[in-house]
Image (spheres, rainbow, N blue to C red):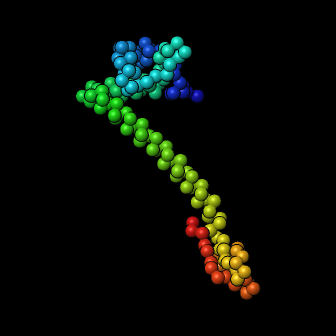
């Protein structure tokens, strides 16, 4: 069992050391909204491992010449992409579950009798003469 990457455990001095930055730089990034750590009851910043990784990414982009505003936009877009990936995964799983459930129903055929009643039939079977089908409906898999 490893450390929870989202657990806010590092004080600003430790996070700054791990990210190889000055603590004042972390405060500036917090003010700009680039990396926003959790806050303790006394308003003390607590950084998670994910926050430290984000600080390193901000530093890398900054060294490549990207402005702080550009870095903020990049991070926002990356967060959106990650959220969309999670949503696609959820929807794919939901679709797979729905397909599994309906595959057993796909072998059934419904027919409407002369009296307007609905009759369930096995695929390839015809309704009895007393309830001749007017309309046949088959669910699509």
**Which of these two is toward me, 70 or 55?**
70
**Which of these two is toward me, 112 or 36?**
112
- Which residue is drawn at the image coordinates 40% and 21% (left, top)? 30
In the rendered structure, the answer to whether residue 25 lies left or right of residue 137 reads left
- Which residue is drawn at the image coordinates 67% and 78% (left, top)? 112
Residue furthest out toward the right: 130
Residue furthest out toward the left: 65
- Which residue is drawn at the image coordinates 43% and 12% (left, top)? 13
In the rendered structure, the answer to whether residue 121 lies left or right of residue 91 reads right
**Which of these two is toward me, 139 or 5?**
139
Quarter of the figure that contains the N terminus: top right
Above or below, comparing residue 1 to residue 105 in the picture:
above
In the rendered structure, the answer to whether residue 117 lies left or right of residue 25 reads right
Residue 111 seen in the current view? yes
**Percent position of residue 76, x then y:** 38, 35
Residue 127 seen in the current view? no
Residue furthest out toward the bottom: 129
**Percent position of residue 17, x then y:** 40, 15
- Which residue is drawn at the image coordinates 70% and 83% (left, top)? 114
**Percent position of residue 2, x then y:** 55, 27
Above or below, comparing residue 101 to residue 77 in the picture:
below
Above or below, comparing residue 20 to residue 75 in the picture:
above
Quarter of the figure that contains the C terminus: bottom right
Q: How many numbered circles does the render carry? A: 0
Residue furthest out toward the front: 115
**Percent position of residue 29, x then y:** 36, 22
In the rendered structure, the answer to whether residue 117 lies left or right of residue 90 reads right
């Amino acid at each position: 069992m490893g450390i929870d990457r989202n657990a806010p455990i590092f004080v600003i001095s430790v996070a700054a050391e791990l990210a190889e930055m000055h603590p004042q730089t972390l405060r500036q990034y917090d003010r700009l909204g680039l990396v926003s750590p959790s806050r303790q009851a006394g308003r003390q910043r607590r950084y998670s491992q994910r926050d430290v990784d984000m600080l390193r990414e901000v530093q890398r982009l900054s060294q490549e010449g990207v402005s702080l505003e550009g870095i903020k936009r990049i991070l926002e877009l990356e967060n959106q992409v990650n959220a969309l990936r999670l949503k696609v995964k959820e929807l794919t799983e939901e679709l797979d579950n729905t397909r599994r459930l309906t595959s057993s129903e796909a072998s059934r055929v419904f027919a409407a009798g002369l009296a307007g009643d609905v009759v369930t039939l096995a695929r390839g079977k015809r309704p009895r003469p007393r309830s001749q089908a007017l309309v046949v409906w088959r669910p699509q898999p």
